[in-house]
Amino acid sequence: MNGRGPPRGGPGRRVRKAEEKAPRSPPAPARGYVRHAFPHTWRSPYGVLTENSVPGTKVYGERLFMHEGKELRTWNPRRSKLGAIAILGSNALKFEGNETILYLGAASGTTVSHLSDIVAGGSVVAVEKSIRSFRDLLNVARMRRNIHPVLSDARETDTLVPIIPGGADMVYQDVAQRDQAQIFLDACDRFLKPGGLGVLMVKARSITVSRDTKEVFDEVEGQLRDSGLKVWERKNLEPFEADHVAMVVNRP
Ligand SMILES: C[S@@+](CC[C@H](N)C(=O)[O-])C[C@H]1O[C@@H](n2cnc3c(N)ncnc32)[C@H](O)[C@@H]1O
């Protein structure tokens, strides 16, 4: 990526204005775009992109490109830890495209918006406790029919029971709290369906600043195993995020 946009005749046409929804002529020959392992997701010379489920709209200033008649949104790995995983690759994290995802720590909806593209046939229940972030999240959810925003502390699992009565195929958490592992375990215990996947973004510095990060990650991994979850992967997010790992678990 050189930050100057695609070269002429390059792989796809850049959408310069949000209102430009579709090309007037067929898009340029598809060179350099390959499908990603995640549904509705592509790799390209411009990074990983998801198919925009609301063409013509942006969520956080991402760039829009046309490819094979679809509008694609760039996914910034420095703004989204899942975006970092999408670039780095994962052996354990998989999507079918129709999952119900419980997302704890939705913030303004950056990652949630890409997940909503990926699970276009499913839904994302997005929980956020900060009113300020929740306002932005509401604006994202207004445009996207498969995002269900919930203003709540992720620890208050009773609030969520009526919203996901059938449970979740995936629990995704990114809350940067000291008790982040316990919040995740409680949510998985209550909502994750057997066979479902859990993704815990562990921020070591939110748990303690006085201990070695590896020791903190080992301890969290031990907690997850002791609770009966199977830890499939422990993914370092560098160079995009320091002192973070993603734990990908499965509920047997
Ligand atoms: C690192 S940011 C999340 C970024 C977001 N996951 C993304 O990729 O777009 C952490 C968010 O978790 C929220 N949060 C922290 N503790 C929480 C809790 N107990 N319940 C719900 N949200 C919480 C914070 O308000 C903040 O918006």
Image (cartoon, rainbow, N blue to C red):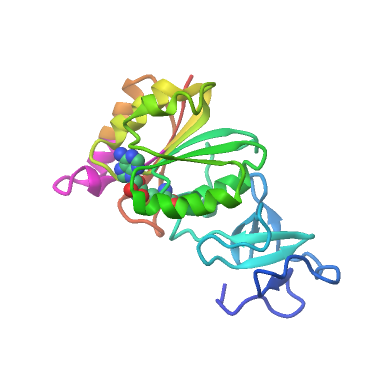
Image quadrant where one finds the N terminus: bottom right
Q: Nearer the viewer, residue 232 or 103?
A: 103
Q: Residue at x 39, y 56 (%)?
A: 238
Left or right: residue 97 versus residue 166 is right
Residue found at the far right of this picture: 25
Q: Is residue 83 above or below residue 120?
A: below
Residue 28 pos. (x, y %): 80, 70
Q: Residue at x 58, y 37 (%)?
A: 123
Residue 65 pos. (x, y %): 68, 66
Q: Nearer the viewer, residue 209 or 23?
A: 23
- Which region of the structure is painted magenta? 200-218
Left or right: residue 42 versus residue 138 is right
Residue 131 pos. (x, y %): 35, 49
Q: Is residue 191 above or below residue 96?
A: above
Q: Nearer the viewer, residue 145 or 176?
A: 145
Residue 6 pos. (x, y %): 66, 75
Q: Is residue 160 magenta?
A: no
Q: Residue at x 43, y 28 (%)?
A: 160
Is any atom of residue 71 visible in this view? yes
Q: Is residue 156 above or below residue 83?
A: above
